Amino acid sequence: MNIILLGPPGAGKGTQATRLVDSRGMVQLSTGDMLRAAVKAGTPVGLQAKALMESGSLVPDEVVSGIIGEALDALSADTGVIFDGYPRTEAQAHSLDTILADRGRTLDHVIELEVDEDALVERITGRFTCATCGEGYHDAFKQPKVEGTCDKCGGHEFKRRPDDNEATVRTRMAEYRAKTAPILPIYEARGIVSRVDGMADMNDVSGAIVAILDGVPA
């Protein structure tokens, strides 16, 4: 089974993809991770990408498509794939069709995690982690049991990501709506788009996604 998980940054795509990898043996193909891995491995497409990245140029669609093709070729035909961060544009959506068809694969589901923008801003801007072990916390939803002390390792240093601020989050949301959301009509026309409440409890979101993949009626 081949699926796309869609949603703005902070919607929980990474968490849900990890759960599908663990529970169903699927493989998460993240374009950013794959580009870095291809560059490190020195594959033909990776070398091409490295030259572009070092010159400060954007990596064009055909190079990204080549990276995805290389990754799929390394998998057995019955391994399910989760596309993360691709496709982002209409052109990439059509490229993905070709990439899959060339390998006898089809796209089965496009699942969008729907979020409330104001609630998402609160979710993201409240995040902080233990600087020692990386345990995650939140101003409103998950404070350490003892103030100033990590529950997991007992550390006392905490940190926040510099881009976890309201202005950055709202910019990323606007970018998602402008660039990625327009690919949805392509897949809606095929009847493969499903939507899940991304603001629900993580376990409920996981359950809704599994029900879609298993064909269980809502």
Image (cartoon, rainbow, N blue to C red):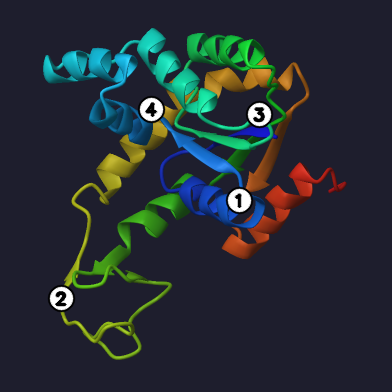
Residue under label 3: 77
Figure check: 88 above or below 202: above
The local secondary structure at tag 1 comes to helix
Which quadrant of the structure image shows residue 107? top right
Q: Earlier in the sequence, mark 4 or mark 2?
A: 2
Residue under label 4: 175
Q: Is residue 138 left or right of residue 48?
A: right
Question: In the image, which is nearer the foreground, mark 3 or mark 2?
Answer: 3
The amino acid at mark 2 is Glu
| Nearer to us in this view, 89 or 79 | 79
The amino acid at mark 3 is Ala
Please identify the residue farthest to the left as the structure is shown.
Answer: 55
Q: Earlier in the sequence, mark 4 or mark 3?
A: 3
Q: Earlier in the sequence, mark 1 or mark 4?
A: 1
The amino acid at mark 1 is Leu
Cα gap from disc 1 to disc 4, whole angstroms: 26 Å
Cα gap from disc 3 to disc 1, whole angstroms: 18 Å
Residue under label 1: 20
Q: Earlier in the sequence, mark 3 or mark 2?
A: 3
Identify the residue at image location x=24%, y=17%.
47
Q: Label for residue 122?
A: none
Q: Is residue 87 left or right of residue 175?
A: right
Q: Label for residue 157?
A: 2
